[in-house]
Image: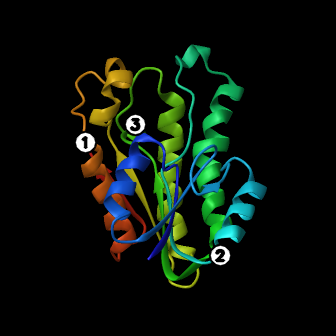
Amino acid sequence: MKIFLVGASGTIGQAVVKELGARHDLVTGGSKTGDVQIDITDAASIKTALKKLGKVDAIVSAAGRVKFAPLDQLDAAGFNIGLQDKLMGQVNLVLIGRDFVNDGGSFTLTSGILDTNPIRNGASASMVNGAVNSFCIAAAVELPHAQRINAVCPGVLVESMKDFGPFFRGHEPVPGSRVALAYAKSVEGAQTGRIFRVE
């Protein structure tokens, strides 16, 4: 399979590279690193990257930023970071990517357990994660050419606890290798419209 992985340099992306890279033709993308440069907040950048790649069997997104801040310090501009980046960036990967994914190919997006398991300072992340999940469920009904779409919804990673541990007290961290298996399940399996929770 030819797979385009966006966000390959991140913690989750690196784990997905290890899981899928050994048995597939994996092309990596990122805003500053990777085989192909791509800015998911810019539709023109997405089109340019996909035209350079040509047809692929799967697009996997492990990318997307949100703003973490107390709710009383979040304004519309703060919420808009996650809306334009993690939400619409991934949605645009699908909308534009429909023409570049082969028949029967797939999209795998990334959300996160804050959709239903919130933390302090995480209102924007919770909102965006829930929206990503809902988009996947709905888009699965209408994607053309037997294309599939799923979201991976991970908890906090073991590898990220040094940075995010204080925000996730009581959460059991999950290793990146286990999270990567959910991406393999989405790409190599047959299911669509599913939210693969790893927590």
Q: How far apart are the alpha carbons under marks 2 and 1?
A: 33 Å
Instruction: Examine the rendered structure and indicate whether residue 11 appears above or below residue 120.
Output: below
Instruction: Examine the rendered structure and indicate whether residue 109 appears above or below residue 71.
Output: below
Q: How far apart are the alpha carbons under marks 2 and 3?
A: 35 Å
Q: Earlier in the sequence, mark 2 or mark 1?
A: 2
Could you say whether the residue bearing mark 3 is in a helix, strand or loop?
A: helix
Numbered label attached to residue 114: 3
Q: Amino acid at mark 1?
A: Pro
Residue 155 percent location from the top left of the image: 32, 40
Instruction: Examine the rendered structure and indicate whether residue 159 appears above or below residue 46.
Output: above
Residue assigned mark 2: 54
Residue assigned mark 1: 175
The residue sitting at 58% across, 46% down in the picture is: 33
Q: Earlier in the sequence, mark 1 or mark 3?
A: 3
> Which quarter of the rendered picture does the N terminus lie within?
bottom left
Asked if the residues shown at circle 2 and circle 1 are in contact, with their CB atoms under 8 angstroms apart, the answer is: no
Q: Is residue 134 left or right of residue 196?
A: right
User: Can residue 64 be seen by looking at this rendering?
Assistant: yes
Residue ranking furthest to the right: 44
Q: Earlier in the sequence, mark 2 or mark 3?
A: 2
> Which quarter of the rendered picture does the C terminus lie within?
top left
Indicate which label's residue lies in the foreground, 1 or 3. 1
Residue 119 percent location from the top left of the image: 39, 25
Classed neighbour count for the residue bearing mark 1: other residues with Cα under 10 Å, few (<14), some (14–19), many (≥20): some
Q: Is residue 150 left or right of residue 30?
A: left
The residue sitting at 21% across, 33% down in the picture is: 172
Could you say whether the residue bearing mark 2 is in a helix, strand or loop?
A: loop
User: Can residue 191 be seen by looking at this rendering?
Assistant: no
Q: Amino acid at mark 2?
A: Gly
Residue 32 percent location from the top left of the image: 63, 43
Q: Amino acid at mark 3?
A: Leu
- Asked which colour scheme the image uses, the reply is rainbow
